[in-house]
Amino acid sequence: MIEHKKKQSFHNKKIAKTFSLSFVLVGILGIIFLDKLIEVFLLSNDMSKQSPLSIGILFIICMGIILYFLLRHMQKIIFNIEKSYNELKQEDQDRLLPYEFALNNSVDAIYLFTLEAKFVYVNQAACDMVGYSKEEMLDMLLEEMDPNFDRNSAQSCMLEIKNSKYWRIETTQKKKDGTIFPVEVSGHGFIYSGTDYICAFGRDMSQKQEYRNKITKINSQLKKSLDEKEILLKEIHHRVKNNMEIVSSLLNMQARRSSDNKFKDAMKKSRSRIHTMALVHEFLYLGENLAYINFPDYIKKLVYDIKDIYIGQNIEVNIYLNIDKLIVSTNKCIQIGMVLHELCVNALKYACNENKDNILSIKMNIINEFINIKIKDNGKGIENITSLYQHNSIGMQLIHSIVQDQLDGDIEFSNNNGLECNIKFLKKELAYG
């Protein structure tokens, strides 16, 4: 209905034509009426007897009637135009009401600028943020609110926003009372009625900056606490390693006091096992990560330390290591290290002889979801291979217990130009470098 009236009143190009034709038509009818009235008046009366006053009065009466109809018609047109205008105005107000509500109740400040960086619109949040009224802000320039700009840089900023698809900046604004506070501003350019404008959105960053400072402080405290705990853990590993070395020294002292070779050999193995565990704590103490150990480096150090303990200077042993790059947890490192220790000790003791090219090969590779370990020497092998599954010695008991019960894996021995041991278990608790 309103659209129809809008077309009839403001956008109807026939209004002027209709009004003009109506004026001409009423004027012609009025003249014809006046002519007939005068004719009748003159025919019934002697012209010589009529005074100019009578004719003038008659003319005025006729023109009054004509003007009445003309003004009445104009009054109807004006009334319809005013009515349509008011309806359109109310419609626009109703249509813009949600947008005005959203703008005025926005948490973020909203500004409209000209390219000269002059405010042409601000919402209530913008006023509340800086403490000015809307009237005061509409008389201000950007640099009066943001002390980081001057006249030239403010206008340059408007052009930069206009030519940027995404524009954002962290700056500061000054309140009416002189308080400076941080604010994040984003902006976009647009054209309205052929004129360029800048729409900007501002958000008070005071609370966010306060949270950021708190988080930074908390992170600093946590880092300090973490560093202290790391130092403490390193010191603990260092002390554990030292204590194990003390135990190893005590066992060595005890072995020297005895003349029993079996006892001395048992003490030597015990010291070697203790060293295997102590080596883990040494790597943790010297390493950067207190949860995982670089396994290839650990195995290399372990094997060569065992070689130094069990192999004399007259025996040459070529050690070949093929260890995939693994970062192993402390628990798994000790378990695998103990198994490798027992197997390497047996190989070095029983497969290596003088005047022989002795070889010890250790491979540890990732194959699908499993870790495969192969330890092989080039000795004579063993005649009764089944005896290795009977757990007769402490070493074999330790090997089978760790592989089967703790690693949940399988172990297999075979003679292959020397004794070969294959171990397979799932790659649990392992991280990879």
Image: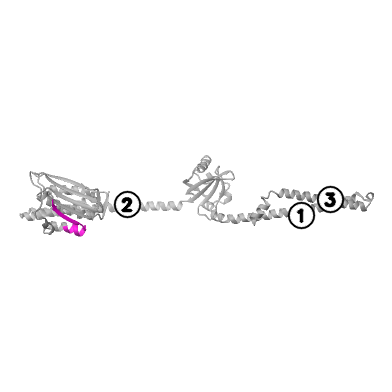
Callout 2 environment at 10 Å: few (<14), some (14 to 19), or many (20+)? Answer: few
Identity of the residue drawn at 73% across and 55% down: 76
Under mark 2, the amino acid is Lys
- Residue under label 1: 72
Counting from the top left corner in percent of width and height, residue 408 is at 21, 58
Q: How is the image coloured?
A: one colour
- Residue under label 2: 224
Nearest to viewer (mark 2 / mark 1): 1
Magenta residue span: 400-415
Of residue 231 and residue 267, the one placed in the foreground of this image is 267
Element under disc 1:
helix
Q: CA distance from mark 1 to mark 3?
A: 20 Å
Element under disc 3:
helix
- Residue under label 3: 32
Work out whether residue 300 can be spotted: yes
Q: Which circle's residue, 2 or 1, is located before the other in the chain? A: 1
Q: CA distance from mark 2 to mark 1?
A: 91 Å
Of residue 108 and residue 424, the one placed in the foreground of this image is 424
Q: Residue furthest top?
A: 152
Q: How many marks?
A: 3
Counting from the top left corner in percent of width and height, residue 403 is at 19, 57
Q: Residue furthest left?
A: 259
- Examine the image and state in which quarter residue 68 appears: bottom right
Counting from the top left corner in percent of width and height, residue 239 is at 21, 53
Q: Is residue 83 left or right of residue 316?
A: right
Q: CA distance from mark 2 to mark 3?
A: 109 Å
> In the rendered structure, does residue 407 fall within the stretch colored magenta?
yes
Q: Which circle's residue, 1 or 3, is located before the other in the chain? A: 3
Q: Tell me whether the residue at label 1 lies in contact with that at label 3, contact meaning CB atoms closer than 8 angstroms.
A: no
